[in-house]
Image (cartoon, grey):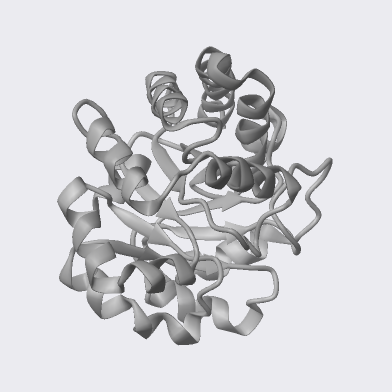
Amino acid sequence: MSKIGKAFENGKAFIAFLTCGDPDLETTAACVRAAVENGADLIELGIPFSDPTAEGPVIQGANLRALTGGVTTDRVFDLVRELRKDVQTPMVFMTYANVIFSYGAERFLSTCREIGMDGLILPDLPYEEKEEFLPLCHTYGVDLVSLVAPTSENRIAMIAKEAEGFLYVVSSLGVTGTRSEITTDLKSIVEVIRQNTDIPCAIGFGISTPEQAAKMAGLSDGAIVGSAIVKIIEKYGKDAPLHVGEYVRGMKEAVCRV
């Protein structure tokens, strides 16, 4: 079984996203540990990229700050090596195809295995082009996590049938960011997924409040939160870990009440 599956073994999962190196890598490490200690079931680590097309202004800003601070892919790998000394929680990278191409795909994925990363999310990789990375992911035991968007429609069943790790259900069109309400018919999307795979699915994009998290976890197997956490880190800087921990605890309690 995929290690990512462990995130969903104890009821509804809360998945936390952080941009590596914002404001610095030490703070990222402390925030990851705070999130895990307060109930995060899976951690998504964003490798900074200069043109993150799926991201809204909050995460774009975090990418820029991290890159300006000198964060590189190699330094992110070192961060994970450090975290894996005591963090057992499943972790996945979220980044862009260009980051992997420029690093060298085989070198990137073999390093993922060496440092203990469990999966990879590439929002700019179309389903039809996943064969560019899938064989290498299989060689090195890294799940290539697929995304299902409201526009996927007749492709949802096909994507679900071949899913690995978990399915990332994009709640709404557009880029990441907190939203006051989510209006997509997610129930029918999840129904199609359930008919085609046993792999868990979690909903992300636009979730920031405990009420939203509970609603999304009620429809799926978990809730993914990124921008709201990145905002906390932007606000508190090096003092963010305590606040991230408190926020994650509240969100995890909300998804567990479903």
State the count of labels.
0
Is 124 located above or below residue 155 in the figure?
above
Left or right: where 11 falls relative to 178: left
Can residue 1 be seen from the camera position used here?
A: no
- Quarter occupied by the C terminus: top right
Is 189 located above or below residue 5 in the figure?
below
Can residue 184 be seen from the camera position used here?
A: yes
Figure quadrant of residue 173: bottom right
Please state which of residues 227 and 203 is positioned toward the viewer in this rendering. 227
Please state which of residues 94 and 78 is positioned toward the viewer in this rendering. 78
Q: Position of residue 176 (x, y in %)?
A: 69, 52
Q: Residue at x 32, y 37 (%)?
A: 79
Please state which of residues 165 and 43 is positioned toward the viewer in this rendering. 43
Q: Position of residue 66 (x, y in %)?
A: 54, 42
- Quarter occupied by the N terminus: bottom left
Q: Position of residue 169 (x, y in %)?
A: 57, 59
Figure quadrant of residue 32: top left
Seen as rendered, the residue at the extreme right is 180
Left or right: where 54 falls relative to 239: right
Q: Residue at x 54, y 50 (%)?
A: 220
Figure quadrant of residue 174: bottom right
Is 170 located above or below residue 61 in the figure?
below
Q: Residue at x 58, y 26 (%)?
A: 251
Left or right: where 99 falls relative to 240: left
Q: Position of residue 94 (x, y in %)?
A: 46, 55
